[in-house]
Amino acid sequence: MSLWEGNRIKDINEADFGRKEIEIAEVEMPGLMACREEFGPSQILKGARITGSLHMTIQTAVLIETLHKLGADLRWCSCNIFSTQDHAAAAIAKAGSAKVFAWKGENLQEYWELTFEALNFPNNQGPTILVDDGGDATMMILEGAKWEKIYEERKELPDPARYETEDEKNLYAVLKRTIPEDPTRWRRCIKDLAGVSEETTTGVHRLYQIAKKGELPFPAINVNDSVTKSKFDNVYGCRHSLPDGIFRATDVMIAGKKVVICGFGDVGKGCAEAMVGCGARVYVTEIDPICALQACMKGLQVVRLESVLKEADIFITTTGNKNIIMAEHMAQMKNNAIVGNIGHFDNEIDYHGLCNWPEIKKVEIKPQVERFQFPDGHGVIMLAQGRLLNLGCATGHPSFVMSNSFTNQTLAQIELWTNRNTGKYKNEVYKLPKELDEKVARLHLKSLGAELTVLSKEQADYIHVPVEGPYKNEDYKY
Ligand code: NAI
């Protein structure tokens, strides 16, 4: 990896290719371009130091440059070791829109070091707002502050080796190394933070848990649960990028195959629809009777994983839960069954158990595609080491859907920054108001050639909504 003017990226020579793709993406991201027009002239984010921990892709590059054009100073890392598009990282570094700390194929030690660098602005300053995806940057700050207190009391820190997961070991190793150098860094950082806007379901779950315990030290905006995020990115984004990932990784014919989608939430619904569209026979596993019934209404067969282990060809986890497909399950699958995860964390599939299966043989077919052969000769094909395959094996969601998500992100950042001293947001988790959600949708209609019907005053009064919206109450399910 190379250092380039304070960035840590793969190769600055990929910048021109990245720039060409960014320019194409801009046309597909009307929400972000509208934000530039509306909020750029007033430099609404001037003075803000933003750390982003979110897949460093071409689409994210357009978000970064939007926040930069609104006046912010940015440092960026990826929230997954495989999701960076190196040409996007190079283009951002070359333009100077943000300092970038990311490349495709980081190891876990590098991942946490790069997160640390993204959180450290010059002159020992931390960020004043966070864009997080999955909550790792937030976690580093909160755990850092906890460890600083331990260090203050005991003058030493616990041994990272005692932690269970590789992620934890590497996070705490960075904290152990850096806290003695600056023992108040994280607590200063918390004081300066106007808040965090969180992108995904899993990160939002984490935030609600922290807030429930009364341990959230700054406000948070749950971007995921804007309707124009979770009912678009999670559904239609995955509907696009799941088959993209499977095709690029394996080139397998999906038509006629039996595909199991574990979880039928927003992501699962998009994934199942894509597989049906490809001609697959789709099975769904669910724990929630409502989601299971929804799957039945779509004509899908709801099963227990164990019932279809031996006959299905492709298994995809979308649950945001852990231990969904274990090594024992994979041992029973048919030869060359494909196994992948599209949920945020890699704990849905027991990759570790597979690697440690007695006498298993691992062959790397190409980066992010491995075949594991069991002692009896049959094997499974594992995508992206059990990490989210749409970003590991392909390039994630397309620009248009990400424009919806990232317009919400931009509006959330503006909310947090402009209200940093108004007391509007307490240390709790908030959603953006429905007016803004509808605004995000409105911004994306024109480029699709949609003609929105305008309510008459009489009609608006009849259904008890304002002519200009919002048109639904908070409980509406869409
Ligand atoms: P969701 O909560 O809408 O859906 C998850 C579903 O899994 C729920 O219906 C739940 O009942 C079900 N589930 C939980 N445990 C299960 C189990 N043991 N077996 C079967 N089903 C189970 O969440 P959403 O929004 O669909 O997100 C799922 C995951 O995908 C999260 O980790 C999220 O962060 C991630 N995500 C990934 C994206 C990507 O591009 N790869 C995009 C958006 C979200």
Image (cartoon, rainbow, N blue to C red):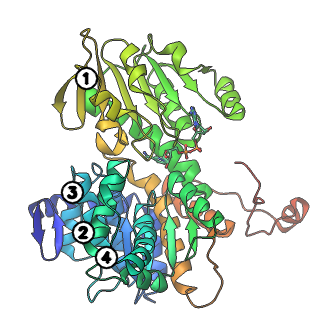
174 left or right of 322 in image: left
Task: Give SS at disc 3.
Answer: loop
Q: Nearer the viewer, mark 4 or mark 2?
A: 4
> Which badge, 1 or 2, is on the more N-terminal residue?
2
Q: Can residue 407 be seen?
A: yes
Task: Give SS at disc 1.
Answer: strand
Q: Nearer the viewer, mark 4 or mark 1?
A: 4
Amino acid at the residue labelled 4: Ile
How many angstroms separate mark 4 from mark 2 (CA)? 23 Å
Kindly identify which residue carries mark 2: 100
Looking at the rendered structure, the number of numbered marks drawn on it comes to: 4
Q: Residue at x 30, y 78 (%)?
A: 120
Amino acid at the residue labelled 3: Trp
How many angstroms separate mark 1 from mark 2 (CA)? 35 Å
Q: Are marks 1 and 2 in contact (CB under 8 Å)?
A: no
> Which badge, 4 or 2, is on the more N-terminal residue?
2
Q: Are marks 3 and 4 in contact (CB under 8 Å)?
A: no
Q: Are marks 4 and 2 in contact (CB under 8 Å)?
A: no
Kindly identify which residue carries mark 1: 372
Q: Are marks 1 and 3 in contact (CB under 8 Å)?
A: no
How many angstroms separate mark 1 from mark 3 (CA)? 26 Å
Indicate which disc residue 179 carries.
4
> Which badge, 4 or 1, is on the more N-terminal residue?
4
Kindly identify which residue carries mark 3: 103
Circle 1 Cα neighbour tier, 10 Å, few/some/many (<14 / 14–19 / ≥20): many
Amino acid at the residue labelled 2: Val
Q: Position of residue 381 (x, y in %)?
A: 29, 24
